[in-house]
């Protein structure tokens, strides 16, 4: 089995996309980016480069138009969820699931996933309650009766619907002082209240060193830690000083915002294999918002 150092696409955050932001040419003037501000509106997604069952962007090179589903619709009484489509009712619940293409891409056999954590509404995914054993359990909301005696979820903690997932509004303001100095401020409204999130920069690479993009990988955007928590109304601001200008860096593709369903983060990587002690329950971390700061072209 491949290690997760090859984990090039394991993200579950919505995609923030802008139109008309072009790649900078190699050898540009050092002052090319000086004093420029780029505003990139966010788009909610249902996986990496995926929106309601359709690939969103051409990732370039031989990578092309590919994407993976990380967010599904709950199917009561069944072992597997369904893919969210344009016809999915907004009052349906979002759920965990398995996209076989994703697991093939990262070299992980999906049979390692505990079937008990597949087709679960996000609120039902077990959370670690024992630091010694890694034991997990489903948490209920905090109440006047259990706040001292049980492990609980912060309020509000109602089930997450399709309407809730797609209710997010997000924008990125990127101020570039030069090609080596910038500040990015990402502003969010209507995220999952009290939700834990992480921000990842997706960078293309040419492993064959021929100038053709054949690989891409996530890195903590602005460095690690790259985590934030929404307030109880779903509002949040994430800001980082950067040693590059994201809107003109030739390798910058997108900035992805992942929702950490179980509240657990893993340092400089989006997730850890379920085979690792106390690893993720099902590996793929849902991407809720994506920013197309690299100006990727539509896949359609």
Image (spheres, rainbow, N blue to C red):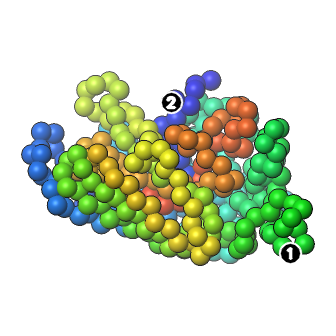
Report the residue at 35% width, 26% height from top.
207
108 relative to 27 in the view: left or right: right
Q: Earlier in the sequence, mark 1 or mark 2?
A: 2
Mark closer to the observer (1, 2) = 1
Q: Is residue 52 above or below residue 29?
A: below
Q: Is residue 194 left or right of residue 149?
A: left
Residue 248 in percent (x, y) is at 23, 50
Residue toward you, 51 or 13: 13
Position of residue 108 relative to residue 221, above or below, is above
Number of marks in picture: 2
Residue 92 x/y as whole percent: 69, 70
Quadrant in which the N terminus is drawn: top right
The residue pinned by badge 1 equals 144
Q: From this viewpoint, is residue 177 visible?
A: yes
Image point 62% across, 63% down: which residue? Answer: 195
Q: Is residue 176 toward the left or the right of residue 115 in the image?
A: left
Mark 1 surroundings within 10 Å by alpha-carbon count, few (fewer than 14), some (14 through 19), many (20 or more): few
Give x and y (percent) for residue 43. Answer: 44, 65
Report the residue at 56% width, 41% height from top: 267
Name the outermost residue toward the front. Answer: 148
Name the image quarter holding residue 111: top right
| Residue 261: x %, y % from top left | 66, 55
Disc 2 crowd rating (10 Å Cα; few below 14, some 14-19, many 20+) is some
Circle 1/circle 2 CB separation < 8 Å: no
Q: Which residue is mark 2?
A: 6
Tell me the residue at 30%/42% (across/down): 251
The tag on residue 67 is none
Disc 1 and disc 2: Cα gap in Å? 47 Å
Secondary element at image label 1: loop
Task: Name the quarter where the C terminus is drawn.
Answer: bottom left
């Amino acid at each position: 089995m491949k290690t997760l150092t090859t984990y090039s696409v394991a993200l579950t955050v919505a995609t923030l996309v802008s139109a008309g932001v072009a790649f900078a040419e190699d050898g540009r003037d050092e002052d090319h980016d000086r004093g420029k501000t780029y505003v990139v509106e966010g788009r909610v997604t249902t996986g990496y480069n995926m929106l309601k069952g359709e690939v969103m962007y051409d990732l370039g090179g031989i990578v092309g138009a590919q994407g993976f589903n990380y967010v599904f619709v709950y199917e009561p009484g069944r072992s597997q969820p369904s893919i969210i489509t344009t016809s999915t009712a907004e009052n349906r619940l979002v759920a965990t699931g398995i996209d076989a293409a994703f697991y093939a891409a990262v070299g992980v056999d999906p049979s390692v996933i505990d079937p008990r954590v597949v087709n679960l509404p996000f609120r039902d995914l077990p959370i670690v309650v024992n630091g010694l054993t890694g034991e997990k359990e489903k948490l209920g909301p905090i109440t006047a009766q259990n706040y001292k005696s049980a492990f609980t979820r912060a309020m509000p903690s109602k089930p997450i619907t399709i309407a809730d997932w797609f209710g997010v509004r997000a924008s990125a303001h990127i101020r570039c002082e030069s090609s080596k100095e910038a500040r990015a401020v990402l502003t969010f409204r209507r995220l999952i209240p009290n939700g834990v999130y992480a921000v990842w920069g997706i960078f293309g690479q040419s492993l064959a060193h021929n100038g053709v993009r054949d690989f891409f990988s996530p890195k903590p955007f602005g460095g690690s830690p790259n985590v934030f928590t929404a307030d109880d109304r779903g509002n949040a601001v994430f800001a980082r000083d950067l040693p590059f200008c994201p809107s003109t860096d030739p390798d910058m593709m997108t900035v992805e915002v992942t929702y950490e369903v179980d509240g657990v983060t893993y340092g400089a990587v989006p997730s850890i294999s379920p085979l690792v002690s106390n690893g993720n329950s099902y590996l793929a971390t849902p991407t809720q918002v994506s920013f197309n700061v690299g100006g990727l072209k539509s896949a359609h």
